Each structure stands twice: as structure tokens, then as C-alpha cells.
Amino acid sequence: MSEWKPVVGLEIHAELMTESKMFSACPVVDSVEAEPNTAVDAVSLGLPGTLPVINQRAMEFGLMVGLALNCTIPPVNQFARKSYFYPDLPKGYQISQYDRPLAVNGWVDIDVTPETGDPYTKRIRIRRAHLEEDTGKLTHVGSESLVDYNRAGVPLLEIVTEPDINSAEEAEAFGRKLRAILQYLGVNNGDMSKGVLRMEPNISVLHRTDTAFRTRTEVKNLNSIRNVFRAIKAETERQIKLYLGGGTVKQATLGWDEGKQKLVIQRYKETADEYRYFPEPDLPIVEMSREWVEQVRLSLPELPDVKRERFETAFGLSHYDATVLCMDRAVAQYFEDALAAGAAPKSAANWMLGSLFSLMNRDGVERDAVGTARVSAAALAELVKLVDGGQINKGTGATVLTEMWETGAGAAAIVAEKGLAQVSDSGALAAVVAQVLDENAAMVTDYLGGKDKLFGALMGMCMKALKGKGNPQIVTDLLKQQIDARRSG
Ligand code: ADP
Ligand code: MG
């Protein structure tokens, strides 16, 4: 296996969150939720005699992405007709960009955590990003097919990488990073399950001794980054097996069958010639004013890498913690909101990455949804302050957070109602410790005889007797003192 490695280039289609379609004032609606064919007009249906007009906001969103991906923005870009016949494409051609795309030659740095070995950073080159329009949608019901044109004409940005990705893990890291960038820019919500964002890997394998790339296949219909990962693993294995068996790989388009968790061949691929690309005669060539490009560059929001740097340097978070917090805009926002509500940065990060995320995982709440979950950032801050201020200990904090998560009640209210406040009064604690030691004299003797592990057990018994509310530091100190006293006594 190690003689071979995957070679992957990704093609990403991102619908742009504009109010109207790419070439007309027709509104854009949620194409999964909306009644079919309620957001269509003469232009998006391609009726004879209609003329397209470029949506400036879509051009601006595309430009933002191009700049965020470190691309060069050529002085002009141009639309082209890509001809093919399909019932969801009413004009018989798609308006796209071909030899003069909006953005070229960019890059994205990714953080990869491989299955074995150390984490590393890698630069993936972006070949191009261009604007086009989305197609409608077909639904097959028995022997009939239904078509919904709500999505026809929705602005779409196609982003194409160089074949720089060499593992499923790298593809996953790239997918997450790109999705984060799109979300930070506010141009796409990253929802792959609804097809708003689609990622199609082109996959080949390279033998250690190869001097040129081999034939690739392309996988469509992947509705999650996890499935991009799975498809690359499966397709790499299939291709290696074919070569080892003396066969060859045929250029093809494959689909991912979610139910069977396997790849199925859809069609053998067409080439660019078959699309009969030619310049779109109904639209002008677009000249990108340098001032506009620079103005948009200056107005870009803080992007994931810069935010992560700031979280590391300003708050002393580890590279890993900062990376996880910045991977979703909603998570980073939640963290910053918790700080604004008075939580200490490191504590807020620990509570989020630990207890809060595990409650979210337990109940299947997506990271994106953290801001709308039961425990608000301000509510988390209240809990963090109670723990950091010593009013409750960490163990109690975890219990309180679970209660907050399940009931929506506030931290202080739960602590008051259940009498969970931490006991730091040495007199009261000393009495409990003494009683535990009296009742477990044999364990104390064994501990003093060298069974060091028993200290933890005695500590656990003290905390249990205190219903978990004892100040752990004070209890530890008292326990040490009193055991010592018994040693000499
Ligand atoms: P086309 O113009 O036919 O779409 P491209 O050469 O532009 O094909 O490549 C499309 C995508 O496939 C790009 O993401 C590119 O990086 C990737 N790619 C190209 N060649 C290979 C290969 N041999 N193996 C894997 N991916 C490839
Ligand atoms: Mg292509």
C-alpha cells in the first residue's frame, strides 16, 4: 500500500447567499424547504427573448472568496456558454466562465491530523474560482421525473484546486478549512446536506516510481465532508486493486451510494470539447476595477487563520484549541461572546472543548448550532465564573452544566436550588476528613505502609462524604495533614 498514494484535486460548488439570482431579480429561496417552482422567472427559465444581467453582489461575493483564497484577480473576466442538454437546464446551456475566470492561482494552508504520525501544515494551491449559475433539480418518482426550477439560476461559485491533496485526511482538512472561510465571509452557510455546498474529488493514485499522473475519476453526490473522506479511501483502494490485478482505470464519474456506503459508476466522462464552450454573447466582458478589488480586500472580515493566531497570542490558547474554536464561525463567535460576558479565556475554552462539546455530541447538536443551543454564551460565562471564583468546584461545575443543558436554567440558580455551593470552610471539612479516616483506619495503615495509590481512594471517600462539594485543594491539604498526624501518632 505504501508504494501508492492518492492524488486528489477538489472541485467545489458553493451557492452564494445573494437575495436574487445570478442573472435576474428573481428571488433565491431555500431549494429544499420551498414549494417547487415558486421562485422562477422568465430569465431563470431561459425563455426566448430574455436577457441576463450580472448580479453585482454575486460578483462581489465571488471576489471576496477569491481574495480570501489568496488568488490573483485578473483585470477582466468573461462569461461563456457551456452547452449540454438536461431537463434541469432549461436553456440547454449553462452560463459559466471558461478561459477567463474571476480568480486564479491562490492557496489555502491546512492543518492535517493524519491517522498515524504527527500533525502537519500543508499548502494546497487553488487553480481558479469562477462564477456560474446553478441548475434546477430533478426528483425521480417511480417511472416519472419531476423538475423544480427554484434553484435554476442561483449564483454558484466553482472553486478548483490543483491536485495537491494526497490523502483522505488532507481532503477532509481542506474541506473544513474552505467551508470555514466561506462561512466567515458570510457568502455560504456550508450546509452540504442541502447541497448548498458541494465537494467533488477527482481521484487518481500515484505509484512510487511514476513520473506522470495517472487517469482520474470524479465522485459526485457527496453530502458531507465525512463522505468525501470515505469516497477517497474507497476509490483509492479500488484503483490500486485494479492496477495490481493488471487492469487500468477508466476516466469516469462516480456517485456515492449513502445506503450501501460504496461507489457506483454513473457515466464515463465527457471532455471540454463536448461542451462547445463559447463566449456568452448576451453579457459584456467584466472589467474589474482595481479600486473595487482593493476596497473589497480591505473590507474582508477576520478569517480563520488570523483569528486563530489572535486566540493563541492574545489569550494563550494552544494551537490545537485555537484551531478547533476557529473551525466554525459560530463556535468562535460563541467563545468571544463568553469572554465579553466575563469568562476567562482559557477556562471558557476548556469548558467549551470539554463538557459543552461532549453534551453537543451526545445529543447530535452540530457545532454550527452552538449559538442557538440551550446554554447561551452568557450562561456558560456565568458557570465559568462560579468555578473560577471558587463558589463551586470543577466536578460540581460539570454536573451543573449538564443540568443547564437539559433544563435551560442558569448556573447560579441551579447551585442555589440544589445547595451545591463549594464548602471551603476548613473547620467543617476537617471534621469530615477526620471521620473518613477514623472509619477507614485499615486503609490509612496500608497507605502509611507504602500503598500510595490509596491516597486517591481516601480522597474520593472524603469528596463523596461531602457530596462532591468540598474544595478539592483544601480537602487534599487536610487529608495530607491528618494522615501525617496519624503517622507520628
Ligand atoms: P477539467 O478541465 O477536465 O475539469 P482539470 O485538469 O481542470 O480537468 O482538473 C479538474 C480537477 O481534477 C482539478 O481539481 C485537478 O486538480 C484535478 N486533477 C487533474 N488531474 C488529476 C489527476 N491525475 N488525479 C487527480 N486529480 C486530478
Ligand atoms: Mg471541471
Image (cartoon, rainbow, N blue to C red):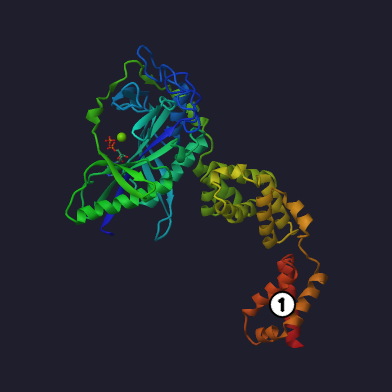
| Residue 447, quarter of picture | bottom right
Residue 134 seen in render: no
Residue 263 place in picture, x, y as percent: 32, 47
Residue 189 place in picture, x, y as percent: 50, 36
Q: Which of the image's four quarters has the N terminus?
A: bottom left
Please give the name of the residue rendered at 46% of the width and 21% of the height, measured from the top-left corner: 56
Please give the name of the residue rendered at 34% of the width and 15% of the height, measured from the top-left corner: 282
Tag 1: residue type? Lys
Residue 309, placed above or below residue 244: above
Q: Nearer the viewer, residue 77 or 200?
A: 200
Left or right of 273, for residue 179: right
Q: Which of the image's four quarters has the C terminus?
A: bottom right
Residue 139 seen in render: yes
Provide the residue designation for mark 1: 480
Does dot 1 land on a helix, a strand or a loop? helix
Left or right of 165, for residue 176: right
Please give the name of the residue rendered at 29% of the width and 20% of the height, measured from the top-left corner: 279
> Which residue is at the far front?
142
| Residue 401, quarter of picture | bottom right
Residue 157, placed above or below residue 402: above
Q: Nearer the viewer, residue 24 or 330?
A: 24
Please give the name of the residue rendered at 38% of the width and 13% of the height, measured from the top-left corner: 50
Local crowd size for mark 1, using a 10 Å CA cut-off: few (<14), some (14–19), many (≥20): some
Ligand 2 quadrant assignment: top left
Residue 442 place in picture, x, y as percent: 70, 86
Left or right of 445, for residue 289: left
